[in-house]
Image (cartoon, rainbow, N blue to C red):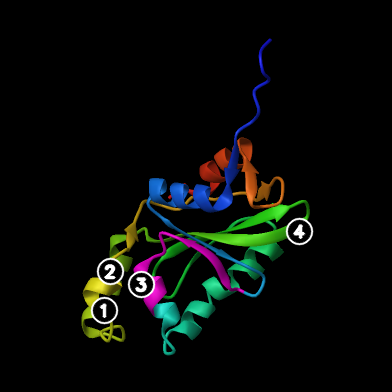
C-alpha cells in the first residue's frame, strides 16, 4: 500500500531568508504599525538610514507607509524611496485581511541612482556614515515589474508550496 504524498509545507521565516538570498534582494516584513517584524538580507543603507535620528523621517515617508499603501491598493505597490532604492510593497493576506506587508527589493535598478548615492556618501549629507559599512550589503538589479496581490494560505507562518512559488514569481521580478 502506497502512502499518500503530503504537500510540502514551508515555514515563512526560513522561506523568506532563502528567497531573499536566492534572488539577491532585501525582504522586510512590516506590520500595520510600520514596525519591521522580520528582515532578510536587509540593505545596509536602509539599516543605517532608518536607525538614524536625522534620516529616519525620510525613510518613514516611504517604507513607513508601505503597509498602508499596499493595503489600500489591495495589490503590490512599487515605489522609489528618497535614497533612490526601488522597492515593492507586497500585501500578505489571510482571507480579506492583510497580515503584513513584505517590502521586497530595496535595490538600485539604475546606475544613476547608485552614483547619486555614492556621491551623497562621499561628500554629501550621508558622509557621516562609514562607506564600508554603508555599502556593505547593497543590491543592484534590473528593472522592476508590476505585481499582483499575494494571498497567504494557512496562518501566515506555515505556507503551502503553491503560495511560496507564487510569492517568488511575483515578488522577485527585479
Q: Which residue is mark 1?
A: 121
Q: Position of residue 113 (x, y in %)?
A: 33, 67
Is tag 4's residue or tag 2's residue first in the polypeptide sequence? 4
Is tag 3's residue or tag 2's residue first in the polypeptide sequence? 3
The span from disc 1 to disc 2 (Cα, nearest Å) is 9 Å
Q: Nearer the viewer, mark 1 or mark 4?
A: 4
Asked if the magenta segment contains residue 43, the reply would be yes
Q: Which residue is mark 2?
A: 135
Tell me what residue is drawn at x 68 percent, y 48 percent.
Answer: 151
Disc 1 element: helix
Front residue of this view, candidates 10 and 96 = 10
Asked if the magenta segment contains residue 101, the reply would be no
CB atoms of marks 1 and 2 within 8 Å = yes
Disc 3 element: helix
CB atoms of marks 1 and 4 within 8 Å = no
Q: Residues within 10 Å of mark 1 (few under 14, many from 20)?
A: some
Q: Residues within 10 Å of mark 4 (few under 14, many from 20)?
A: few
Q: Is residue 73 left or right of residue 113?
A: right
Is tag 3's residue or tag 1's residue first in the polypeptide sequence? 3
Identity of the residue furthest to the top in this view: 1
The span from disc 4 to disc 2 (Cα, nearest Å) is 36 Å
The span from disc 1 to disc 4 (Cα, nearest Å) is 40 Å
Q: Position of residue 159 (x, y in %)?
A: 63, 44
Identity of the residue furthest to the bottom in this view: 54
Q: Which residue is mark 3?
A: 45
CB atoms of marks 3 and 2 within 8 Å = yes
Span of residues in magenta = 34-48
Q: Position of residue 22 (x, y in %)?
A: 40, 45
Amino acid at each position: 500500500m502506497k502512502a499518500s504524498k503530503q504537500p510540502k509545507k514551508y515555514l515563512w521565516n526560513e522561506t523568506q531568508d532563502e528567497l531573499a538570498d536566492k534572488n539577491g534582494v532585501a525582504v522586510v516584513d512590516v506590520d500595520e504599525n510600520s514596525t519591521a517584524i522580520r528582515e532578510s538580507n536587509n540593505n545596509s543603507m536602509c539599516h543605517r538610514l532608518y536607525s538614524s535620528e536625522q534620516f529616519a523621517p525620510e525613510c518613514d515617508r516611504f517604507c513607513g507607509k508601505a503597509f498602508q499603501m499596499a493595503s489600500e491598493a489591495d495589490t503590490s505597490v512599487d515605489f522609489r524611496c528618497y535614497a533612490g532604492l526601488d522597492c515593492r510593497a507586497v500585501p500578505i493576506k489571510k482571507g480579506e485581511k492583510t497580515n503584513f506587508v513584505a517590502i521586497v527589493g530595496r535595490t538600485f535598478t539604475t546606475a544613476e541612482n547608485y552614483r547619486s548615492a555614492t556621491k551623497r556618501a562621499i561628500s554629501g549629507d550621508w558622509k557621516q556614515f562609514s562607506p564600508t559599512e554603508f555599502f556593505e550589503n547593497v543590491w543592484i538589479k534590473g528593472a522592476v515589474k508590476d505585481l499582483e496581490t499575494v494571498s497567504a494560505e494557512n496562518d501566515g507562518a506555515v505556507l503551502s508550496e503553491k503560495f511560496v512559488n507564487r510569492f517568488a514569481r511575483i515578488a522577485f521580478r527585479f
